[in-house]
Every structure is written in structure tokens, then in C-alpha cells.
Amino acid sequence: MKVAGPSLTMIITSMLIATSLAGCSGLSDLNPNAKLIADTEEINAGESVNFDARASTTPDPSIIEEYRWDFDDGATKTSKQGIASHQFNTPGYYSIEVTVVNDQGGMDIAYVSLFVNSPPILSFEYSNVIRTGDSVILDASDSTDPEGGVVSFSWDFDITVDTNNDGDPANDIDSSNSITTELILSESGNRTGSITVTDDKGASNTSSWTVMVLSRNFRVVWEQKHVEFEWSGYLEQGESYQITDNPHPSSRMISVNSTLILARDILPIMWPEDNFTMAINVPSSGWNIFSTTSQDNITQNSSATIVRDNMNSYPETGYTITADSSDELLYSLLNEPGQRFGQGDWIWTITADDCHPDIPIDEIDPDQGNDWQLIVDFLILVPRISEIGI
């Protein structure tokens, strides 16, 4: 009896099925294994993150052909390299994915999570117009952090001045950790500064501020005044006495009259009068002068006089002028070019040049020196400054 074997058709069909099944099993074995890491898990809005999928693998003999990136903010890209960098400008949580594809059409996906921190919200109030010498309150107390973190403050009171001398006047910190600050501005013009609020994750927000500082109005009246000084003493032959005085610092000198008077001898008819020298030195003005006593009439005391008029000119009076402060205005008035003669110390030197010996009484000179008196009269102009409101 002959047993019939399988037909040729059945054999061919079985071979095709086996081949097909073998092909499916091989494709599954060639899928890659995707791996993804990021160089940080948390950033501030506006910063970039580097992603690395180079640790991904694929079975031999396949090779990785491309990396498909999805940054979860609407941006995607495809690269041949397993690294990518991306900037995130909007705060929130992100799930970044990379799809690794090999040359056999196999693929795998890996994910990393990222938190993008929002900057703090800066709320800032101040008066933008003040007058010189007044203070401005800079108030940032309503500033907040959306994530509820702790915030700190730093102030730059003048962005045109490089306080820390690093070449960049815009990065100075003149005050820190103060929610509000009071700033007195003494110079007219615009003052611009900045405030920066920073949260506990290092995110910051900066705002500039400008205050218009207005000058003040003053009325100036020059008041004429006589100021008199008097000194006295006693000098013997060859002795000197020096007086140093600043007659009236807050004034303009117009004239001076200095008179040195000597006491009369006991018997002026019998004994000649003594002679003293009075010298004046004003170092700041370079003025030096002296005068020696004389007696025009036997009935009068010996005296010496030094007079100088028109040391400075008479200014306009009763006018209105703007300035940052009364002190600044006074300084400018007293130091007007060409009107500073007589400022500073005046030095008077009294010298007993010639004390004539008197007729001895019991062989003793009864008067070996003389009493003197110095009288100085200044005519000055004193500026009276009063502020005028608007």
C-alpha cells in the first residue's frame, strides 16, 4: 500500500507562512531603546535647557537614524544628533519627549519633566515730582511671587553713577532688602534709578523710576550793615601783638576803617609821644598795608589810620532767583567772581616801634611802653534770603 505525501502546493504555502512570521519577529527585535536626560529639572522663564538622548541604543545591525523632539510648548525639531537645546519663555510644567527612530523603521519614546518658574510681579509706587531738599518714598510693598516664594529687593538710586566702580553704572546696589525706602534729593533735574525684586529661585524683575526734582524760588535783599570790633592792650619797646579774625563770613565787604590810638604820656609837653605801627594782612586777597602813628595836634593822642573803600561792588537787591537750596544760593552769592575781596581771615599786627624813654623819676623810667586801642569798622552787605512759594 502506498501512502500519499503532501502536495507541492501545501509545501510552498507552509514555507511562505514561516517566512512571514520570521520577518515579524525580527522587526520587533530591532526597535531602539530611547533614553533622555536634561541638565536641570527647574529653570526660570526665559532660560534654556539642554537635553541629551545620546544614551539611547538600537540592536545590531540597525543604526539610529534621527531624533524627533517635542518640547511641549508648540515647538518641535528633528535632528541627527542626540542633543538639543531649547528656551522656555512661559512659566509652567512641561513634559518633553524625544522619539528615537532607527533605519529599520523601529522607534521608541522617552520623556523628562521640567518646571519653568515665573518671575515675581513688581508693583511700585512713588511721587514723580518733588522739590529740591524734599524726600520721595519709593514703595514696592505690593510686589508678589506667583508661586508664593519669598522675595527680596535691591535699589539703585542713580543709574548714571557707578557706585561699585565696575564700569557698569546700571548694576549697582545702593540698598537691599528694604520694601520701601526714603530718598532725599537735593539737586534739581531728573533723577533716574531702578528697583529689582528677586524670588527665592533667583528669578527677578526690574523696573526703572524717574523723579523730576524742581528747584526753589528765593528773594534776595542785600542789607547794609556796620560791624565794629575793638581791641586794646599794652606793649613795651620792640614788642608786637597780633589779632586774627574773620570779620563776617556771610557777607560782602565794602569798606574798612582801622584806627590805632595810643594813650598819651604823663607829661606830653616834656616827653615826646611814642610811635607804634599797625599792619593789616588779608592772605586770601593778597592785601598787605601798614601805617605808623603820628600826632597832628599836641592836645590829641597819637594815632594811625588805614582806610579802604570799594573793596567790592554793590549788587542788585530785591530780586528773585531760583536755586536748589538757600545754602547753595548763599554760597554762590558770596563767591561771585570778582566780588570776593576781604573774605577769610584778617590779621592785624601792632608793634611798639619807638617808645621814647621818659624823664626818670628816682632813676626809673615811669613809662617803658604804652597802652593802645584798635578800633575797626567794616561796612558790609549781608544777603537776606527768603523762599517764595508758588
Image (spheres, rainbow, N blue to C red):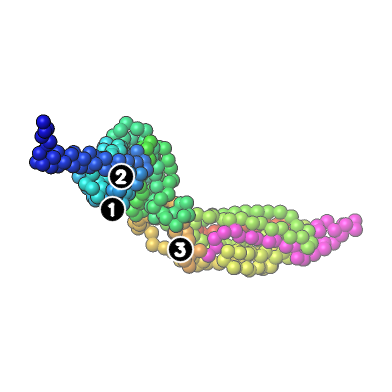
Stretch in magenta: 341-369
Q: Residues within 10 Å of mark 2 (few under 14, many from 20)?
A: many
Say which of 258 and 274 sits in front: 258
Q: Of discs 3 and 1, which sits in the foreground?
A: 1
Q: Of discs 1 and 2, which sits in the foreground?
A: 2
Say which of 134 and 137 sits in front: 137
The quadrant of the image that shows the N terminus is top left
Q: Which residue is mark 2?
A: 58
Q: Residue at x 42, y 40 (%)?
A: 176
Q: Residue at x 57, y 56 (%)?
A: 247
Under mark 1, the amino acid is: Lys
Label drawn at residue 336: 3
Q: Which residue is mark 1?
A: 80
Under mark 3, the amino acid is: Glu
Whether residue 388 is visible, yes or no, is no
Q: Is residue 269 left or right of residue 163?
A: right
Q: Are marks 3 and 1 in contact (CB under 8 Å)?
A: no
Distance between the alpha carbons at the discs numbered 3 and 1: 78 Å
Above or below 197: residue 245: below
Q: Residues within 10 Å of mark 3 (few under 14, many from 20)?
A: few
